[in-house]
Image (tube, rainbow, N blue to C red):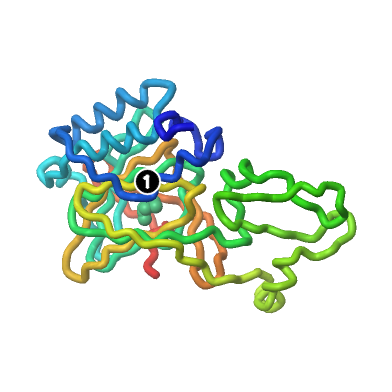
Amino acid sequence: MEIESANCKHRVSECTDFNQLNIERPLKIVQDIDGLETLVSELHKVFSKSYVNIQEVQKLMSSYKSDPKHWKKYAKFDRFRYTRNLVDAGNGAFNIMILCWGPGHASAIHDHADSHCFMKLLSGSLEEVRYDWPNTVEPEVLKKLKKPTRRCCSESEDNVVNKMTNLDITSDCDNCGQKGKIENEKCTDYEETGYNAQEMEEIGRTRLDVDDVCYINDALGLHRMENPSHVDGAVSLHLYCPPFDSCRVFDSRTGKPTEVKVTFWSMYGKKMKRVIESDPADQE
Ligand SMILES: N[C@@H](CS(=O)O)C(=O)O
Ligand SMILES: [Fe+2]
């Protein structure tokens, strides 16, 4: 399947072919959408169709040239952590928001709740750090991809060939109780903490410059974003489809996931009342 035919109106795990999701590099195309409002209305047009391909969304986002006068009313910073500022709720099909990163602000390692995530840098610079999924957590998309596993009691000799990641979740065999290989080999922390801890593996870093667009979904791994500047803020534009209001954050030392709510700092340019709860804005 070609990249053009990936329908991002659906959750990532509902896509029928996963190879096309692998857009790893920031896209650099400069065209001429002349304002954020125009971009949003173009996105509405695209998402009113039943079939929306990933590249179409990426191209649209690339076609808009960032200009602070278009988005400054949404750019509300906090001293302590990055903020999420809703621009448009996309008629329920997507949401688009502006994230403001103060100097040194970073997100925790997180997933994207089985949604497609497009991101464009509007100002400053950001670094994306990608991670492999920890062996102990299986995302929806990989459950779908997984072929029948070889069982230790030899009911099935099917080989598991997982092309997307080395995800390897093993557990005791239901029939004979034999322990999974990974569990036997890597259980040093398990007895003390009750959790099979494993340091998370970094699989790549990408520096984003202004107007670059990149894309991630759970099939491609986990990530965290960081504003590497200790002086300047950064502003990014994020589009999620379908929209989500919670995701998982991961402890980089153990891979342990925690479900967190994601909230908005402002909506449509108006600051929200402060609700104290955790989200992926926690610093490393
Ligand atoms: N996905 C994160 C921002 S980022 O670090 O990609 C969020 O929506 O808060
Ligand atoms: Fe993210």
Q: Nearer the viewer, residue 123 or 18?
A: 18
Q: Nearer the viewer, residue 282 or 49?
A: 49
Left or right? Give the position of 68 relative to 242: left
Residue under label 1? 215
Residue 52: percent from left, percent from top: 40, 28
Residue 155: percent from left, percent from top: 86, 48
Q: Quadrant of residue 180?
A: bottom right
Q: Nearer the viewer, residue 281 or 155?
A: 155
Residue beneath the point at 15% across and 35% down: 35
- Furthest residue toward top: 49
Asked whether residue 200 is in view, the answer is yes
Asked whether residue 107 is in view, the answer is no
Residue 204: percent from left, percent from top: 41, 61
Q: Is residue 231 above or below residue 101?
A: below
Q: Nearer the viewer, residue 63 or 154?
A: 154
Look at label 1 and name its amino acid. Tyr
Residue beneath the point at 42% across and 38% down: 243
Left or right? Give the position of 195 relative to 223: right
- Furthest residue toward left: 69
Residue 264: percent from left, percent from top: 34, 48
Q: Quadrant of residue 39?
A: top left
